[in-house]
Image: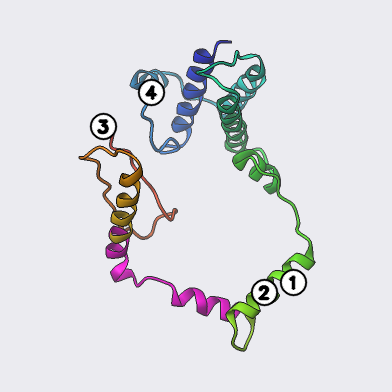
């Protein structure tokens, strides 16, 4: 399989997930013809999407590497294919364990830590926070003291964004018309979301 074919199949696979859960693909800046193609297909079955992800993953080692498809890019695509396989299996109703899910979604192995490391971390926090009373209560009080009042959140976000843009502009040429619009919302299942509005 050639790199272009693999990438095209990978993109189609990802877009098919949006047919199972609207909004799964939150931003697609590629060929709109691919999105139209997927919209015209029969509704996908999650188990078949999982099988497609595994087929592409199995083909990945034999895809020729080069300037446009480096080993790093292959690793990136492979990690996404493992995540899509896991997501499809979950949509199909398969019981996926937490450790496996974290590994497949985030490409990281997790396990229990050594209790002594936690005790040492708690002792260090106890020392840094100072004061009396249970550590959990002091930690919570410390976090509350750093919270931005909801009425000032928009103002703070804009100030931070402006300062960050100045730093980035000093190192990289941003388009002169480039802007970011922030909207503070509540009652959403996420803590932050973005929409790419195009043009760059």
Q: Quadrant of the N terminus?
A: top right
Identify the residue shown where x is 34% and y is 22%. Answer: 32
Residue 198 placement (x, y as % from top left): 28, 33
Q: Residues within 10 Å of mark 3 (few under 14, many from 20)?
A: few
Q: Are marks 2 and 4 in contact (CB under 8 Å)?
A: no
Q: Which residues are magenta?
A: 136-158
Mark 1 or 4, which is nearer the eye?
1
Residue at figure coordinates x 56%, y 22% from the top left = 70
Q: Label 1 vs label 2: CA separation?
A: 9 Å
Instruction: Say left or right for 121 vs 151.
Output: right
Q: Quadrant of residue 123?
A: bottom right
Residue 157: image x %, image y %? 32, 60
Measure the alpha-carbon separation of dots 2 and 4.
52 Å
N-terminal of the pair, mark 2 or mark 3, is: 2
Q: CA distance from mark 1 to mark 4?
A: 51 Å
Q: Is residue 183 visible?
A: no
Closest to the camera, between mark 4 and mark 3, is 3
Secondary element at tag 4: helix
- Give the label on residue 124, or none: 2
> At 43% from the left edge and 18% from the top edge, which residue is drawn?
41
Mark 1 surroundings: few (<14), some (14-19) or many (≥20) residues within 10 A: few
Q: Which mark is residue 119?
A: 1
Query: Mark 4 highlights which residue?
Result: 35
Colour scheme shown: rainbow
């Amino acid at each position: 399989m050639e790199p272009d074919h693999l990438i095209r199949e990978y993109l189609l696979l990802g877009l098919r997930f949006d047919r199972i859960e609207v909004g799964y693909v939150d931003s697609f800046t590629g060929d709109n013809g691919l999105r139209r193609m997927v919209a015209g297909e029969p509704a996908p079955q999650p188990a078949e999407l999982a099988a497609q992800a595994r087929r592409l993953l199995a083909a990945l080692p034999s895809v020729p590497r080069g300037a446009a498809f480096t080993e790093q890019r292959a690793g990136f695509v492979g990690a996404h294919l493992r995540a899509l396989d896991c997501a499809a299996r979950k949509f199909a109703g398969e019981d996926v364990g937490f450790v496996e899910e974290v590994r497949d979604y985030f490409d990281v192995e997790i396990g229990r830590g050594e209790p002594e490391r936690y005790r040492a971390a708690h002792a260090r926090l106890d020392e840094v926070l100072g004061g009396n009373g249970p550590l959990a209560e002091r930690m919570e009080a410390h976090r509350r003291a750093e919270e931005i009042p909801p009425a000032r959140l928009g103002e703070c976000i804009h100030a931070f964004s402006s300062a960050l843009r100045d730093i980035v502009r000093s190192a990289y040429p941003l388009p002169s018309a480039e802007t970011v619009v922030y909207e503070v919302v509540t009652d959403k299942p996420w803590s932050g979301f973005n929409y790419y509005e195009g043009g760059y």
